[in-house]
Image (cartoon, rainbow, N blue to C red):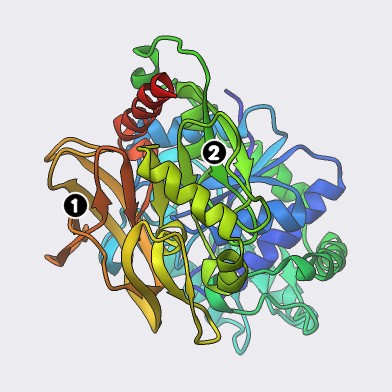
Amino acid sequence: MNCPRVMLAAPASGSGKTLITCGILQALVNRGLGTASFKCGPDYIDPMFHQRVIGAKSRNLDTFFTDPETTRYLFGHGAAGQDISVVEGVMGYYDGLGGTTLTGSSFDVARTLQIPTVLIINCKGQSLSVLAVLKGFLEYEQPSMIKGVILNRMSPMLYGNIREIIERQFGLRVLGYVPQVEELRLESRHLGLVLPHEVERLKEGLQKLAGILEETLDLDGLIALSREAPPLAFQRPAFFRKQGKREPIPIAVAEDEAFCFTYRDNLELLEELGARLVSFSPLEDRELPKGCRGMLLSGGYPELYAGRLSENKSMRQAIRQALERGMPCMAECGGFLYLHEELEGTEGVSYPMVGAISGRAYPTGKLGRFGYITLTAQEDQLLLSKGEQVRGHEFHYWESENCGESFRAQKPVGKREWLCGHGTEALYAGFPHVFYYSNPQAALNFLKKCEEYSCLF
């Protein structure tokens, strides 16, 4: 498939790539181009930000979660029918698993998908030194996939001369510069949180940035570069071709301000296997959607809304009763916190929750067990049989008195491992966020259990 695509990467975190990516996405949308966006790595925040603030369809690409064939399929599926796809890198361009490998890096994604890459260099306090940085990144791996550069926080007075030297020495496209825009920043905050009331202000700011980038960047050149990407060959994974048709199975999916971290590809995989997803709000609704045969409680910010979640006694009771009847449920991170007997909110007050998991969840003030993991089932359970594996990651500032012992989690680099997660015939609950495409059988097992449950009620 002809699939115009470009990656925006940087030498390091903090180089301004997220803000510039959002400004470029806004400018492309303003031009009327069908625009898809992707984020390298497991992060929920940037894709959610792209979608809520800019309106661009967004999803993740991760070469730890998926093999090259599956990665190509997920990208091709997400990019189909779009005029251009913009991929935002993660961390430094070559930074991969454990900080010592290329696997899972932005470069690994660019290499797997043959994406022309534009390196965004933070030029504050530099002039010719920018060339040394660029030379190192061009030569570290061959081919580097780097085809262009954007000079961030570059003085307009210096830009013309530096551009000329870069083009002469490296034959590289210099696609413009970004002046320092003091009044528009994406502040670091709790999990990158963007509250609903902030969206309109951010939309206004990004419209202003898009206007600036129309003046200082060669967006036509960026679009032309994306069209130089070679055709992408991909096919639907064999796993799907083995599945027969089934009657749609209604699954209740928690979606509101408290529960908003769900991989789009996870939901679409369930739909492809036969699920009919029905959204509900544990904050606002009083009961579960009628007729549903399974439940997804995703990650998010329940700690910020602990008081409101606790006040909704009717929903808490409905969920507990459904679990006691054996309704299949997957509860990840925030959803796992919600199932506890008590959850301590951000203001230091503990509130009653669903009560399906004994014990209390509480803040630690620091990230716990942060990063990629491979989960191995310790016994037969909802998602997997004993010894089978699925991949995921952890990212949480809250801890539990009862993390569970149904899985062995192991870091991909090094020897660190631990037991975690609650797994029964009908429940998966734990801190790890699972990426279904790393082992689609886990998603199918969940759906089959929901199908069995539908025969009982």
- Count of numbered circles in the view: 2
How busy is the neighbourhood of tag 1: few (under 14 within 10 Å), some, or many (20 plus)?
many
**Residue 406, labelled with which disc?**
1
Rendering quarter of residue 372: bottom left
Q: What residue is at 37 percent from the left and 33 percent from the top?
A: 443
Residue 286 vs 337, above or below: the answer is above
How busy is the neighbourhood of tag 2: few (under 14 within 10 Å), some, or many (20 plus)?
many
Rendering quarter of residue 5: top right
Q: Secondary structure at mark 2?
A: strand
**Residue 375, labelled with which disc?**
none
Residue tagged 2: 252
> Which quadrant: the N terminus?
top right
Residue 271 vs 7, above or below: the answer is above
Q: Secondary structure at mark 1?
A: loop
- The percent coordinates of residue 274 (x first, y second) are 48, 21
Q: In the current view of this chain or complex, which residue is farthest to the bottom?
A: 125
Q: Amino acid at mark 2?
A: Ala
- The percent coordinates of residue 138 (x first, y second) are 45, 60
Is 418 left, or right, of 75 in this rendering? left
Is 361 left, or right, of 2 in this rendering? left
- The percent coordinates of residue 93 (x first, y second) are 45, 62
Q: What residue is at 31 percent from the left and 57 percent from the top?
A: 102
User: Foreground residue, 158 or 110?
Assistant: 110
User: Foreground residue, 158 or 104?
Assistant: 104
Tell me the distance, in whole angstroms, between the alpha carbons under discs 2 and 1.
Answer: 24 Å
User: Foreground residue, 313 or 412?
Assistant: 313
